[in-house]
Structures are given as structure tokens and as C-alpha cells.
């Protein structure tokens, strides 16, 4: 046995470390490390699961697989031309193949140089940021492209910040960054690097209401992304850091400095050489800047009406017209729309010139006796948004309201004679109201009567400045354009277009609450001569129209108007045949189309189909149809309406004699009391057009019939439009005859009544006016 001294010596010697055994401090370190790791794992899980609602929501798997960003819905013409967009954020996605390589290189060099190496989190960059924060030295940004994408796609700093701890100082950003790390890793697992780059460029805000690279390229440079130069691509990448601060439009010097920094980053990481860097940094900033908005594009009035039609469908089908990236295909023909807008502009510029000349130095708002309406502007201003806003701002302070209504401000107004139809002025709201009240307004629509498809729609003279639509929204008295509903009732009752009546007065006797009524002809007199019904309609004779109304009864006329698609309230009064009740141009073209379409009424159609962002058809639109007239009656009405362009004295004869149109063409002019409204309806075998011209208020109009009749106010617009349409052979418009039934039971050859073989000649002197004017008088120039 060892002695006690030996044992004490052995016990006092240091013991060697054995495998698996640790000193106290090491054991504590690893224990704390393990607990910390468990804590981090638990924390990440808790954030992912929103444990006890402490951290706020996280996107579910479905949202991750289909991340939602607002996409503008696009609206196309029938010939596949982009007309405009519906959006809250103007974004149209680009495919990766549509992106130039130098754009991708610029983005990676600027925002995430190790993008291809990490899986959502750049450990080196994150460590650099952490070290900088600990030492107080900054350290730069540590977010990867994927983290930035997660922030924008899932709104981590807005929508997802709704947990109990989200408002605790210091924790909010930690929780937010954690979510972005988690989402970045998930995105990297779900998508390829190319898909992430594409989503990033398509998602971000570039300023100027441009979301996504497609819209940004068009807004700032008028190009598609693939057409961007390297310097232009660097400019747009530079904008991403702070769209307002680095806007090439509003901060060009700062934007150029930022662009050149991006180019130097590309050089630093080997994407461009020194010579390319030198060349690109010297490039001037050349912009082709144009912000897309609802005022721009083809047929803005039409697009607004389409949106009204589709909102209910979107609501019923859980779609969002302004963010789902829908493709909406319409019936509009972009070529016809261009010709319609051109015709309206050309004609209305001349109408405004004449109107201004007639009322130069005088107030145009007059009562039926020609006296200035007292307080007209003071009453009108109360219907404006500016007045209501001031009333809310200064309740019970009329002097303050009056002060701001008369305070002058710099502004732009619509003006026919200025570049881009805009003029910079200094006006008060009252001045502006008076200015716009003096502007003549117009509406125009063209429709294919065989299928109801709207081919052109011009709701006013300028959508940017005057939003009110005069095609469908506006309703005015149609004047004599309502007369065909009188004559179609007569034809349907068995009267022939050749039936004769004398041009004498017809009086509707007085009844309770209504005085006796004797309609007068436009000239104010009666010739006593005999005319066929076709002649009477061609010359728009009120005397014979009144006789037909009296013979059939106003109720019959109303019933035929309703049968032909007029939905506005129509009063069954003696004046019904002269357009005494307000209707829209939209209703009128639908009704007239029935005559051309063999008696089948077809509801006007604006949209043919809607597709989702992936091209799947969501809905196709089929027009409503119903038989309103027999084929024979319908054809006889086209024959009757042709009389305006074929009969001597026809109110639309200038379409043949002046514009030199060939083939069969029908028409009907309309003029209302005091010349407040000028109308024209024109029809050919596959196109029916309706148009109206007048003041915003009925009290604003031309002073006499020389300028104020429908054949001068509206008809030339049709001639200008059709001249362009016929000249465009790609449109393939039918210039032949209206389809005729195999047999007719009612006489149409009226030649024996006037000037035909064996018939009595028309004895009306050839120099009698009968509302006719020369083409150069209508246009103020030779055509």
C-alpha cells in the first residue's frame, strides 16, 4: 500500500483533461450557445407562426406561390391596338426575355453584387451591417435583392406590421427584418434567380406613376425595356433607391450623378470596361417623358363607359378591374376612332369660330326671348365641385367663398387655337366657368348595325378638360331625328313611301291643360303642294309629320320608339314626332341600326371578351337581340331615309352633291327650338353614325337658323368622318346597296308622282332654299 505522503503528493498534482470533459467556463459557454440557438430557432418559428399574435401576419403558402402585385388592366381595340389602361398603380409586367442584359447587370452591380451566390440572405453583408451598428460606423445596406422584393411584394413594413409587439420601440424593425429574411429564403426556394430578377424589376416604383420596368421605360424614354441603352438602364436602376430624389425629370442633375455611380459600380464588378464607362458617363440625359394617365390614349370617353359596365361584373366575379392585369378586348376600331376624333376636332374648331363671332362682346346665355339670363353664372357655379369645397371650408362665410371664387390663379384651359389645345392663362374660378360655358360641345358614335359593335366613340371635344360624355351620359331633345319613328309606324300600318299628302297646316286641338298646337315648317309657311311621305321625310316637313302623328296617335309613335330601343321616358304628346323628349345619341344609333339590320334590334356592344393576366378567357359578350320590325318595314325605312340624300330638296343632299359620296346612303338632320341642338344620323349598309352639337346649357346656342340648323351644326362632321373611312381601303366598308327583301308588298317607285315617265314634274323652283347650303358655306372652305 502507498504511504499517506505518496497519496497526498498524487492528489496535489494537476489532473489531465480527459475527452468529453469541460471546464466550468467552457461548459457554460456551450450551454448558453445551445440555449441561444434554441431561442433563435424558437423566435424564427414564433415570427413565422405569429405566435400568440405577437408578431403579425405572414403570407401563407398560396400567397407565396402567387405573390400579388397590382397590375394595370389593359384595354384593346378590335384591331389589337392598346387603347389605354385601368390602374391604381400603373404596372404592366415584362418577361425576362424582354430585359436587356445591361439592365440586369446594372441592377446586380448596384443592389446585390453576390446575388448569384446567396440563397436569400447575404451573410457577409448582414455581418458588415451588424458590425457597423455595434461600432457606430454604419456599414451600408445589407438587404439582398430577394429581401427587397419580399418587402415590396408582401408589404412587410405596412400590411404585415399588425402584431402586439409591432409598436414596441426597437422591436418593430427587428420583427420586420426577420420576416423579410424568412420570406427571402422561401422565395429563393420557390423561384429561380431569373424569376426573382424579373419580379423585382416588374414590382418596384420608379416614380411619375410608373410601376415596373415596362411602364418606366415608356414613361421616361418612350421605349420598350429591350430598347434601353446602357446609360438609360443605369438611370432607371438609379431611380429605384429614391424615385423622387433621383427622378431624371424633376432632378436631372442629381439623377445624372446617380446614373454615373451605377455605371461605376458596373465597371467595379466587371460588367463594363473603362472605355465603355467613359463613353456612357458622358452621355447627356435625353428623355421622352410622358406620364400615362386616364386622359391619354385612344377613346377616353369610351373607356370610362366601359369601366362603368365592367365594375358590376368585377364585383360579382371577385375581380379588381384596377389591379388584376386583365386584358379587355373592345369593339372599337382604332382607325375609325382616329378618323372620328379628327372629324370632330376639325368641325368643332370651325363651329367655335362661328359661335364666337356671333356672340363677340355679348353674353350668350339667353332665355327664349333672347334676353340675358340674370345670375346665370352665379347659379351655375353652385353646381361645381369648387363651390362645394369652399362651402365646406367656409361654412356660413359667404364673403370668404366669394373671395376665393373671384381670386385669380395661373391655370391651363382648353383652347382650339393653341399648341396641344392648351393655353396658359390667369383666371378666377368664375372666369373659368364663363370661359367653358362659351365652348360648344359635341358627341359622336359609329356602330356596325349588323352586330351592334361600337366602332368609334367621341364623347366630347377634349376629355382632359371636359369629362362629361355626350354620347351616353348626355341627353337632349333630338328634334327631327325623331321623325323616323313616326314614319316607321305609318309604314308598318300599311302606308307607302309614295303616299301623298298636301303641305298644309295640321292643328292638334286643345285639351285639358294643353293649348291647341299647330306645328310650322322650318320656313314658317306652307306651300300647299302635294308631297309623298318620302319627300316629306327627306325635306323634314313638319306639316306632313304632324298629320301622320295625328292620324296614328302620339301613343303609337311612343310604342314604336320603345320597340326600337329608346329607353328614356317619352311623353305621348302631339310634339312627340318632333323630338320633344330628351334621348341620348347612344339610344338613337341603336334604334336606327334596326332599320339596316332587317328589323332586328341589337343592343350596342362595347366589349367582346375579357381575359385574365394569363390569357384565360373569363367572359365573352354576346349582344341582346329581338325582332322589332318586319324585314320589309325595315327596308322601306332605309329607302325613306335615303330620300334625304336622293330627293330634290333633301336636307342631306349635300352628302352626294358636295362630298360626292357614291352608293346608297341615308340620313336625317335634327334641329331644336332656338337652335339649341343640332343632330345628324347617317346610315350606310354596315355603319350607322349619330352626332350632336350644342352648348353645355340649352340657353347657349347660335342666334339664327343659318348657323344653328342640324345640317350645318352636325352633318359636316359625318361627311368628314365618312370621307376618311371610305378612303381607307383596309376598313372594307360596304359602299353598295342596302339589303333588299326578295319581294315587297308596298310600292316604292314614286317616280310617277314627280318627274318619272308619264308622271307630273316637281314644280318647285330649283333656286328655292329649303334649308340647303353649299358645301363651302358649311365648312368655310373648299373640300
Image (cartoon, rainbow, N blue to C red):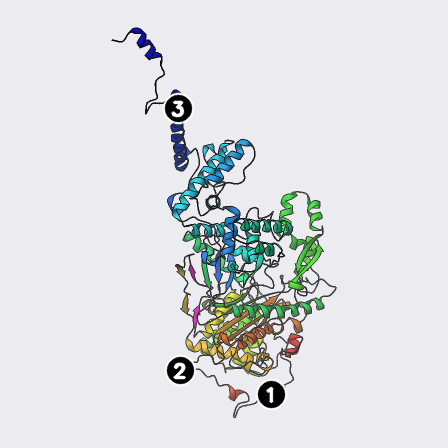
| Residue 181 seen anywhere in this rendered image of the structure | yes
- Secondary structure under tag 2 reads loop
* Real-space Cα separation, disc 1 to disc 2, in angstroms: 34 Å
Disc 1 designates what residue?
Answer: 763
Camera-nearest residue between 49 and 327: 49
Q: Earlier in the sequence, mark 3 or mark 2?
A: 3
- Secondary structure under tag 3 reads helix
Disc 3 designates what residue?
Answer: 26
Q: Is residue 488 rendered magenta in the image?
A: no
Point out residue 603 in the picture as x, y percentages from the top left corner. 45, 66
Point out residue 301 in the picture as x, y percentages from the top left corner. 54, 61
| Residue 506 seen anywhere in this rendered image of the structure | no
Magenta highlight range: 597-617
Point out residue 336 in the picture as x, y percentages from the top left corner. 53, 70
Mark 1 neighbour density, 10 Å: few (under 14) some (14–19) many (20 or more): few
Camera-nearest residue between 189 and 744: 189
* Real-space Cα separation, disc 3 to disc 1, in angstroms: 126 Å
Q: Are marks 1 and 2 in contact (CB under 8 Å)?
A: no
Q: Is residue 599 rendered magenta in the image?
A: yes
Disc 2 designates what residue?
Answer: 742
Q: Earlier in the sequence, mark 1 or mark 2?
A: 2
Amino acid at each position: 500500500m502507498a504511504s499517506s505522503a505518496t497519496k497526498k503528493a498524487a492528489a496535489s498534482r494537476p489532473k489531465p483533461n480527459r475527452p468529453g470533459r469541460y471546464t466550468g467556463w467552457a461548459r457554460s459557454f456551450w450551454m448558453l450557445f445551445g440555449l441561444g440557438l434554441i431561442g433563435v430557432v424558437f423566435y424564427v418559428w414564433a415570427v413565422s407562426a405569429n405566435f400568440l399574435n405577437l408578431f403579425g401576419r405572414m403570407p401563407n403558402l398560396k400567397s407565396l406561390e402567387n405573390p400579388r402585385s397590382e397590375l394595370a388592366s389593359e384595354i384593346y381595340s378590335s384591331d389589337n391596338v392598346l387603347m389605354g389602361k385601368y390602374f391604381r398603380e400603373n404596372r404592366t409586367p415584362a418577361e425576362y426575355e424582354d430585359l436587356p442584359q445591361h439592365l440586369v447587370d446594372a441592377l446586380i452591380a448596384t443592389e446585390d453584387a453576390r446575388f448569384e451566390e446567396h440563397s436569400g440572405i447575404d451573410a457577409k453583408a448582414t455581418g458588415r451591417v451588424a458590425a457597423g451598428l455595434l461600432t457606430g460606423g454604419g456599414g451600408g445596406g445589407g438587404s439582398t435583392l430577394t429581401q427587397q422584393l419580399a418587402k415590396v411584394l408582401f408589404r412587410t413594413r405596412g400590411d404585415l406590421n399588425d402584431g402586439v409587439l409591432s409598436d414596441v420601440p426597437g422591436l418593430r424593425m427587428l420583427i420586420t427584418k426577420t420576416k423579410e429574411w424568412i420570406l427571402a429564403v422561401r422565395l429563393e426556394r420557390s423561384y429561380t434567380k431569373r424569376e426573382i430578377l424579373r419580379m423585382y424589376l416588374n414590382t418596384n416604383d420608379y416614380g411619375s406613376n410608373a410601376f415596373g420596368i415596362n411602364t418606366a421605360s415608356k414613361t421616361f424614354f418612350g421605349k420598350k425595356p429591350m430598347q434601353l441603352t446602357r446609360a438609360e438602364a443605369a438611370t432607371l436602376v438609379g431611380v429605384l433607391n429614391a424615385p423622387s430624389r433621383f427622378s431624371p425629370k424633376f432632378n436631372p442633375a442629381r439623377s445624372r450623378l446617380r446614373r454615373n455611380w451605377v455605371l461605376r459600380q458596373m465597371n467595379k464588378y466587371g460588367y463594363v470596361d473603362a472605355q465603355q464607362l467613359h463613353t456612357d458617363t458622358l452621355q447627356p440625359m435625353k428623355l421622352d417623358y410622358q406620364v400615362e394617365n386616364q386622359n391619354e390614349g385612344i377613346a377616353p370617353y369610351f373607356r370610362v363607359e366601359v369601366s362603368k359596365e365592367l365594375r358590376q361584373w368585377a364585383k360579382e366575379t371577385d375581380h379588381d378591374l384596377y389591379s388584376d392585369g386583365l386584358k379587355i378586348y373592345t369593339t372599337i376600331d382604332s382607325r375609325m376612332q382616329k378618323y372620328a376624333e379628327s372629324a370632330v376636332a376639325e368641325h368643332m374648331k370651325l363651329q367655335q369660330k362661328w359661335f364666337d363671332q356671333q356672340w363677340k362682346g355679348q353674353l350668350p346665355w339667353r332665355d327664349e326671348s333672347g334676353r340675358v339670363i340674370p345670375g346665370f353664372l352665379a347659379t351655375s357655379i353652385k353646381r361645381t365641385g369648387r363651390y362645394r369645397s369652399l362651402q365646406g371650408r367656409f361654412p356660413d362665410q359667404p364673403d370668404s367663398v366669394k373671395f376665393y371664387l373671384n381670386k385669380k390663379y395661373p391655370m391651363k384651359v382648353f383652347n382650339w387655337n393653341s399648341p396641344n389645345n392648351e393655353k396658359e392663362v390667369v383666371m378666377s374660378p368664375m372666369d373659368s366657368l364663363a370661359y367653358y360655358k362659351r365652348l360648344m360641345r359635341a358627341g359622336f358614335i359609329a356602330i356596325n348595325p349588323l352586330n351592334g359593335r361600337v366602332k368609334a366613340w367621341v364623347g366630347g371635344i377634349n376629355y382632359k378638360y371636359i369629362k362629361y360624355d355626350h354620347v351616353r351620359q348626355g341627353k337632349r331633345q333630338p328634334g327631327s331625328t325623331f321623325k323616323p319613328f313616326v314614319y316607321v309606324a305609318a309604314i308598318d300600318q300599311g302606308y307607302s313611301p309614295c303616299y301623298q299628302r298636301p303641305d298644309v297646316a295640321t292643328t292638334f286641338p286643345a285639351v285639358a291643360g294643353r293649348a291647341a298646337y299647330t306645328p310650322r315648317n322650318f320656313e314658317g309657311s306652307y306651300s300647299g303642294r302635294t308631297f309623298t311621305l318620302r319627300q316629306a321625310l327627306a325635306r323634314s316637313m313638319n306639316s306632313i309629320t304632324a298629320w301622320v302623328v295625328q292620324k296614328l296617335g302620339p301613343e303609337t309613335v311612343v310604342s314604336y320608339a320603345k320597340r326600337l330601343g329608346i329607353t328614356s321616358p317619352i311623353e305621348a304628346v302631339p310634339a312627340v314626332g318632333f323630338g320633344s323628349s330628351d334621348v341620348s345619341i347612344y339610344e338613337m344609333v341603336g334604334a336606327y341600326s334596326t332599320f339596316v339590320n332587317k328589323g332586328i334590334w341589337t343592343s350596342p356592344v362595347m366589349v367582346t371578351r375579357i381575359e385574365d393576366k394569363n390569357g384565360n378567357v373569363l367572359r365573352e359578350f354576346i349582344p341582346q337581340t329581338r325582332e322589332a320590325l318586319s324585314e320589309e318595314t325595315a327596308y322601306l325605312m332605309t329607302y325613306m331615309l335615303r330620300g334625304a340624300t336622293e330627293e330634290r330638296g333633301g336636307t342631306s343632299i349635300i352628302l352626294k352633291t358636295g362630298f360626292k359620296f357614291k352608293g346608297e346612303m341615308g340620313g336625317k338632320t335634327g334641329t331644336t327650338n332656338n337652335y339649341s341642338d343640332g343632330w345628324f344620323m347617317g346610315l350606310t349598309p354596315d355603319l350607322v353614325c349619330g352626332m350632336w352639337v350644342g352648348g353645355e346649357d340649352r340657353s347657349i346656342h347660335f342666334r339664327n337658323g343659318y348657323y344653328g340648323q342640324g345640317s350645318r351644326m352636325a352633318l359636316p362632321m359625318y361627311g368628314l368622318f365618312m370621307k376618311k373611312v371610305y378612303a381607307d381601303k383596309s376598313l372594307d366598308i360596304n359602299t353598295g346597296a342596302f339589303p333588299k327583301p326578295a319581294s315587297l308588298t308596298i310600292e316604292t317607285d314614286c317616280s310617277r308622282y314627280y318627274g318619272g315617265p308619264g308622271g307630273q314634274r316637281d314644280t318647285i323652283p330649283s333656286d328655292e332654299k329649303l334649308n340647303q347650303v353649299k358645301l363651302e358655306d358649311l365648312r368655310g372652305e373648299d373640300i
